[in-house]
Image (cartoon, rainbow, N blue to C red):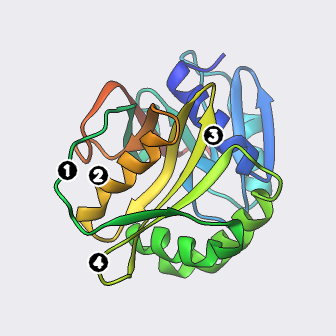
Amino acid sequence: MLPPALTELTDYFAPLSTFQREEGGALTLLTPGVNVLGLNATYLPEVVPDLRSALAWHEMQELPPLLASLSPVAGAEQVAALEVGTFTPVELQDSGIVVEQISRLHMQKWADVLTAAHSTPEWAAPLARHLAARLEGQRDYLPLLAYDSAGAAVGALLWRGVNGAGAAHLWGVTDETARLPLLNAAWALAEGLRVSALPGAVTLSETTGVFFGVSGDE
């Protein structure tokens, strides 16, 4: 059984992934052709099981043996560390930022912003194609775009409704002034929001650290 924070992430990412596989309490999500960490990792229970089969599955799909856990895994090279926590809306002066819901037909613009925010613009087209297909018929997910006062798209977030609250584990901004308006708008969709963020990037409560590392046991 996965720890609660990892269950939150897998509940959010599994419907968006291409392949899912569970073994020994670990859950693997793989999505070839897309570079999102959450869609290409084996999520680990607190007692780490034998990972040989899971790592072999990564190799079969020609994907790095990425592990997600609550603490660094021995022998794995850490590539990212996140906080998963509760976002509380912040009262803001008018920043000129406007946030809108968009349809999946406009996922290319959404993906352009997200990948630019994470310095991986070359992945925009495959991400847009993948998510547009996955979001078809998915009423739990809503893509949001934030625009600055000049009308340029500067923030992207994929919201999911979960048990009367919301989750945003895939988001990013190219303009820091869009960060809080974007999260405020996502919070308002269900008056509650669980978020993944780099440590210190956003003030969160009830946080749990999550580590992503590439296993050396290939």
Closer mark to the observer between disc 1 and disc 2: 1
Classify mark 2: residues with Cα within 10 Å, few (<14), some (14-19) or many (20+): some
Counting from the top left corner in percent of width and height, residue 77 is at 43, 47
Classify mark 1: residues with Cα within 10 Å, few (<14), some (14-19) or many (20+): few
Distance between the alpha carbons at the discs numbered 2 and 3: 21 Å
Residue 174 visible to an observer of this rendering? yes
* Residue ID for mark 3: 12
* Residue ID for mark 1: 92
Mark 1 and mark 3 lie on one chain; the one further toward the N terminus is 3
Q: The residue tagged with tag 4: helix, strand or loop?
A: loop
Closer mark to the observer between disc 1 and disc 3: 1
What mark, if any, has residue 180 been given in the picture?
Answer: 2
Mark 1 and mark 2 lie on one chain; the one further toward the N terminus is 1
Q: The residue tagged with tag 2: helix, strand or loop?
A: helix
Counting from the top left corner in percent of width and height, residue 205 is at 30, 26
Residue 55 visible to an observer of this rendering? no
Q: Residue at x 55, y 29 (%)?
A: 6
Q: Residue at x 60, y 27 (%)?
A: 164
* Residue ID for mark 4: 149
- Dot 1 and dot 2 residues touching (CB under 8 Å): yes
| Viewer-side residue, 120 vs 189 | 189
Q: Residue furthest left?
A: 93
